[in-house]
Image (tube, helix red, strand yellow):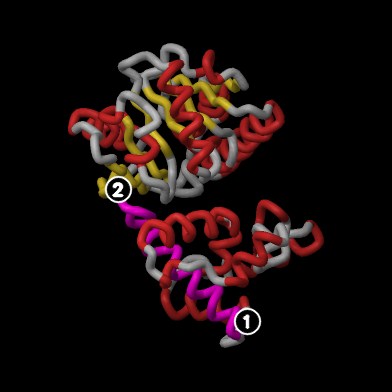
Amino acid sequence: MKNIAVIGAGTMGNGIAHTFAQSGFEVQLIDISAQALEKGIATIAKNLDRMIAKDTISEADKTATLARINPTTDLKQGVNGVSLVVEAATENIDLKLDIFRKLEEYCSAETILATNTSSISVTRIASATRRANKVIGMHFMNPVPLMKLVEIIRGYDTSDEIANTIISLSEQLGKVPVTVNDYPGFVANRILMPMINESIETLYHGVAGVAEIDTVMKLGMAHPMGPLQLADFIGLDVCLSILNVMYDGFKNPKYAPCPLLVNMVTAGKLGVKSGEGFYDYSESKKAEKISSMFL
C-alpha cells in the first residue's frame, strides 16, 4: 500500500497528506476548491520549514515530501488506482454520505475507504457503499504531523483483516493506534467535548472569565491549553457539530450545546479560523494572545 488519496485540503486533510507523504507514500490530495488545495500545500510547506528549523528533517526531506503530493480537484481521477482513501471533509453527514457514494462508484473493489470523522457513525457512513466490511474510521488528532494518537473506529461490519491492516499502517506512520467501537463521539470527543461545553457553560453563567477558566485548567489540572483556547483551535463550529451528533445519538441533556456556543457559531465567531472566538486572533492581537496561551 503505497498510493493513497486524501479528500479535503483543510486543516486535517493537509496534515494527513503531509504525514503520509513524509512516510514515503504517494498522495493524491483532493479538494473541490483549487484555492483550498493551494492553501493546503502552502501549509504543508510551512510546517515542513518548521521541522527543518528544529533540525528534525532536512531540506531534501521537504523537497521529497512535497514531490509525493499531487493536488487535484478531480475526485474520480484522484482515487483511480489507490489502495486507500482517507476522507477528511467537513464534519457533515450528508456531505460524507455523498462522498462515499461516489467513492463506491469510482474506486476499485479492493480499495479501503477510511473516514477521519471525529463523531459521526462509521456504520452509517459505510451504509452509502456496498463494501461496509472495507470501511473504517481513522480519527487523526490535530496537528496531525505531531500528534501520535489515531483512533481506529470499527464499523458494525468492518472486517478483522481491514482493521489489522489499518492498525499496521498507522504504526508505519509512527502513530499509536487505539481501537474503539462505533458510538457517538467515540472516546476522544465523548470525553473532551462535554468538558469544553461545561467550560462554556461556566463562562455563560458568569462564574469566571475566559482567561480565569483557562488558567484554572492549565495550572490546576496540568492541561497544556485551556478548554476555551482549545475550542478556538478546534473551531467552535466543529465543537457544535460534534456535540449535536452526541446529543442526537444519546438523547442525554449533558451533551446539549451551551446557548453561548450556539450563538457564537451563528454570529460567525468560530475561533482561530474566523479571527475571533473566545480570544481575538486579529493581526493586531494575534502575537499578544498566542504568546499568552503558553505562559
Q: Taking 210 as reference, is 114 above or below it?
A: above
Disc 1: which residue: 209
Mark 2 residue type: Asp
Mark 1 residue type: Gly
Q: Taking 147 as reference, is 268 above or below it?
A: below
Label 2 secondary element? loop
Judge by depth and name the residue closer to the eye, 286 or 88.
Answer: 88
Disc 2: which residue: 182
- Indicate the quadrant where residue 272 lies: bottom right
Q: Is disc 1 surrounded by few (<14), some (14 to 19) or many (20+) residues within 10 Å?
A: some
In the rendered image, residue 199 lying in the magenta stretch gets the answer yes
Left or right of 295, for residue 193: left
Q: Residue furthest bottom?
A: 207
Q: For the residues carrying marks 2 and 1, which lies nearer the camera in this image?
A: 2
Label 1 secondary element? loop
Left or right of 174, for residue 245: right
In the rendered image, residue 170 lying in the magenta stretch gets the answer no
Q: Position of residue 44 (x, y in %)?
A: 59, 35
Q: Taking 221 as reference, is 149 above or below it?
A: above
Q: Position of residue 159 (x, y in %)?
A: 21, 32
Magenta span of residues: 183-205
Residue at mark 2 to residue at mark 1: CA–CA distance:
36 Å
Q: Are marks 2 and 1 in contact (CB under 8 Å)?
A: no
Q: Which mark is residue 37?
A: none
* Image quadrant containing the N terminus: top left
Query: Residue at position x 73%, y 57% from top?
Result: 275
* Image quadrant containing the C terminus: bottom right
Q: Position of residue 112 (x, y in %)?
A: 34, 25
